[in-house]
């Protein structure tokens, strides 16, 4: 990636991070205002306010949506800040969780659910290019989505073998025969781009023909 | 907690005034301001028992307000509010002597709990 491109990404990240702070303020105001309404309802005699039950259920919905907004804003904020440094120490499992949250909508359009299941390796830190790594994860998801029918799940998890870190992106559901599925992924127009990104990360990407998926191999520290 | 004098400082006026109203409904004497300079003036004139202070504000930042309060050797506990997902500024605030911090949007029960802990730590 050229210096100019890195500056462009950092610029987008900075502006996005700034906006997420503003969005948090908006959510904070909505939360306090709905909270005040709840407080007033709680101290008012029932007869004074008509349709209390409907107001209360609306307030619960507002609260739920605020919580949803807070989670999304936090994820977007972290995503934006990932462009702060070109190379940084990151927690691989945390980054996978974050990217899954941000990509859920894309998978949802194909009725596919994204999940992660790396309970055995907590705090798996690597030194890498955070933006590029997220691109690799997202492109892997896209390759899988292009090759699998509607429905099913994509499970993303990590494995550690010495200094080698593996990210497995496995498709689950009603899928074609394994060789056909592997051919379909490698024929995806995103596959060459994914290979290129993996090389830029100092790693590699391979098709796991035995297990319906992609394996991304990353070094502990990018050189 | 009742009759406790709290100064709330945040540049988001709608947020800080609504939060003050909610605390007042719980019997807490909450006063709100949107400006760091005004906060420093109110600390002197009204002698609040505690300050709830936003970290990121235009003009004098929350961290600068905290620094100036601590420079005057005032023993008022300060709870910081941060809007950031990461806790870099909150950590800096803790280093400067804040009692604790909360990430916005604030859960009022959590805030009251922290306020209680701050008062307890003073006695």
Image: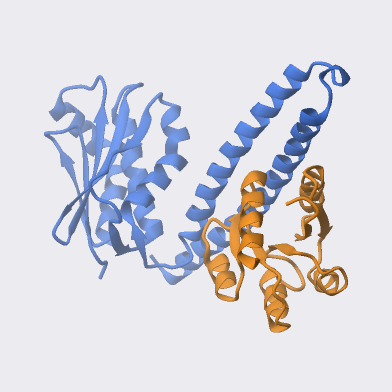
Chain colours: A blue, B orange
From the viewer's perspective, is residue B42 above or below residue A41? Answer: below
Query: Is B20 positioned to the left or the right of A57 in the image?
Result: right
Query: Is A181 positioned to the left or the right of A110 in the image?
Result: left
Q: Which image quarter: residue A172?
A: top left
Residue appearing at x 75%, y 73% in the figure: B60
Which of A120 and B41 lies nearest the eye of the viewer? B41
Which of A47 and A172 lies nearest the eye of the viewer? A47
Residue appearing at x 29%, y 40% in the figure: A156
| Residue A10 showing in the rendered view | yes
Which of A119 and A187 lies nearest the eye of the viewer? A119
Residue appearing at x 66%, y 72% in the figure: B63
Instruction: For the C terminus of chain A, give its image quadrant.
Output: bottom left
Residue B22 placement (x, y as % from top left): 78, 44
From the viewer's perspective, is residue B110 above or below residue A67? Answer: below
Residue B70 placement (x, y as % from top left): 68, 79
Instruction: For the N terminus of chain A, give its image quadrant.
Output: bottom left
From the viewer's perspective, is residue A221 above or below residue B96? Answer: above
Q: Which image quarter: residue B59?
A: bottom right
Tally of numbered discs: 0
Q: Which image quarter: residue A68?
A: top right
From the viewer's perspective, is residue B4 above or below residue B66? Answer: above
| Residue B80 showing in the rendered view | no
Residue A29 placement (x, y as % from top left): 73, 45
Query: Is A63 positioned to the left or the right of B30 in the image?
Result: left
Residue B58 placement (x, y as % from top left): 75, 68
């Amino acid at each position: 990636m050229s210096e100019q491109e890195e500056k462009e990404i950092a610029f987008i990240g900075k502006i996005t991070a700034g906006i997420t702070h503003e969005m948090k303020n908006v959510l904070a105001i909505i939360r306090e205002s709905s909270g005040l309404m709840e407080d007033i309802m709680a101290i008012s005699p029932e007869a004074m306010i008509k349709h209390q039950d409907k107001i209360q259920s609306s307030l619960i919905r507002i609260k739920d949506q605020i919580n949803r907004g807070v989670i999304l804003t936090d994820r977007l904020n972290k995503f934006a800040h990932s462009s702060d440094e070109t190379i940084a120490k990151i927690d691989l499992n945390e980054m996978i969780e974050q990217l899954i949250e941000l990509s859920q909508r894309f998978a949802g359009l194909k009725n596919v659910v994204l999940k992660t299941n790396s309970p055995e390796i907590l705090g798996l830190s690597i030194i890498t290019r955070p933006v590029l790594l997220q691109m690799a994860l997202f492109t892997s998801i896209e390759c899988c989505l292009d090759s699998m029918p509607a429905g099913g799940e994509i499970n993303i998890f990590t494995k550690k073998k010495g200094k080698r870190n593996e990210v497995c992106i496995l498709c689950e559901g009603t899928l074609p025969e394994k060789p056909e599925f592997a051919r379909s992924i490698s024929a995806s127009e995103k596959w060459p781009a994914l290979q290129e990104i993996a090389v830029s990360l100092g790693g590699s990407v391979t098709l796991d023909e035995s297990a319906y998926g992609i394996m991304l191999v990353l070094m502990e520290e990018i050189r | 907690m009742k009759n406790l004098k709290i100064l709330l400082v945040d540049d988001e006026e709608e947020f800080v005034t609504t939060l003050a109203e909610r605390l007042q409904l719980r019997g807490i004497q909450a006063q709100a301001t949107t400006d760091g300079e005004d906060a420093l003036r109110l600390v002197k004139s009204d002698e609040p028992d505690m300050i709830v202070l936003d970290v990121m504000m235009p003009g004098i930042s929350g961290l600068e307000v905290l620094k100036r309060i601590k420079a005057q050797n005032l023993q008022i506990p300060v709870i910081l509010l941060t809007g950031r997902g990461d806790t870099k500024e909150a950590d800096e605030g803790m280093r400067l002597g804040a009692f604790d911090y909360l990430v916005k949007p604030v859960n009022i029960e959590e805030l009251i709990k922290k306020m209680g802990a701050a008062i307890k730590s003073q006695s």
